[in-house]
Image (cartoon, grey):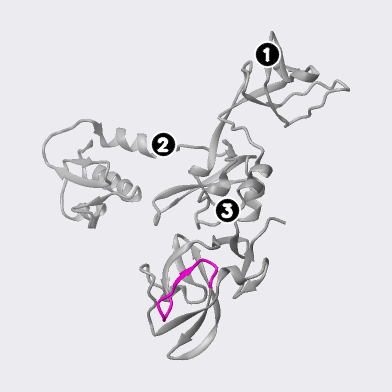
Amino acid sequence: MEKIFCNTNEERDKVLQRLEDMGYLWSGNKYKTTKLTSVYDAPMTIYIDNDKMVTQSFLNDRKEFGATEWLEKELKPKYKVGDLFQIKPNVTDLTNSMYLSLTSRMIDRAGSLVTLVSTVFDRISRKQYLCFKEVGGLWSEDCVNPIKEVKRPAKVGEFVKVTNPDNYLFNEYKFGDILKVVDYIHNLTCYKKEDGKFLYEEEYVVLEGYEDCNYVKKFEEKFVPYLEFYASNYGIIGEDTNIIDAVGRRLRIGDTVEIYHYGEYLEESTIVKNQAKNFVMGICSFCNPDGSIRNDYKIIKKRSYKEINDREVVHDIRYVKSKK
């Protein structure tokens, strides 16, 4: 548990606003922390725990932190514009964007280096997302590795980036190439030991934090059929859901249903998943978290996901069943 002492109401307001932005709640997980600003005056000590809870005391319990010291610690940017990251080689297994979608462009960049241009704090999910120069979208920190470029001799097994290539005619590398070190002899860094290929220390920087990858191969090995809506992933085909049709059949992602409203047939649609929610495409706002559907909408299963052809489109949803 951390203790933050606020000597003035101004310090109190800044600390409570920051805690609210971080997802902390006050009084039994019920109220926003900024509610304290209209109830209690400083001086006061704010207690925060690992369960995202906030309590307060008027005791002169000044440590662990003063308000100014704590705010400086919490508001200090974790990353800065220009920082280098590697999109994780297994990004296809991760929820990588703010909208829980995975576009083909993102998949194609798995394992590559990207440069930070901005960060975004999402008040709904209470998470920080990253925006990169080389690829669109807002990315979760879980999907990238921070990379440090360090000028030093490389160790066996590390990766280096060529930054100052020698112009020797028979060199097989060029500026920007990433090479794995297989041996190190004096100032010669070998990257192809069997052929005696090497570079000098002054030609590269070490990429600390870089993961080995053959991301195209890994993606092909791990490919799973999915639904696509305007280049966004709308669920893994065949995954179970909590949605049940009007005659009691549990539905899976990719099953199609007939939609009825007040008994009148509307259209055929698809069971999808986006933003961690299962729903019927076209009536998302009427689908409840428990799988039920309100406002007199009824659904009846029409086709199993197994009956839909690869690349077939139902209600703007494309079925991607193979890697082409």
Task: From the viewer's perspective, tell me whether residue 47 is left or right of residue 128.
Answer: left
Callout 3 crowding tier (Cα within 10 Å): few <14, some 14–19, many ≥20: some
The mark found on residue 137 in the picture is 3
Q: Which residue type carries mark 2?
A: Lys
Of the two numbered discs 2 and 1 on the same chain, state the one appearing first in sequence: 2
Name the residue located 47 percent from the left edge and 70 percent from the top edge.
251
Stretch of the chain drawn in magenta:
245-255
On the image, the x and y values in percent for residue 267 come to 55, 84
Tell me the SS state at disc 3. loop
Q: Is residue 64 above or below residue 230?
A: above
Question: Label 2 vs label 3: CA separation?
Answer: 24 Å
Asked if residue 227 can be seen in this view, the reply is yes
Q: Which residue type carries mark 3?
A: Gly
**Toward the viewer: 92 or 321?**
321
Residue highlighted by disc 2? 76
Residue highlighted by disc 1? 184
**Toward the viewer: 170 or 13?**
170
Q: Quadrant of residue 285?
A: bottom left
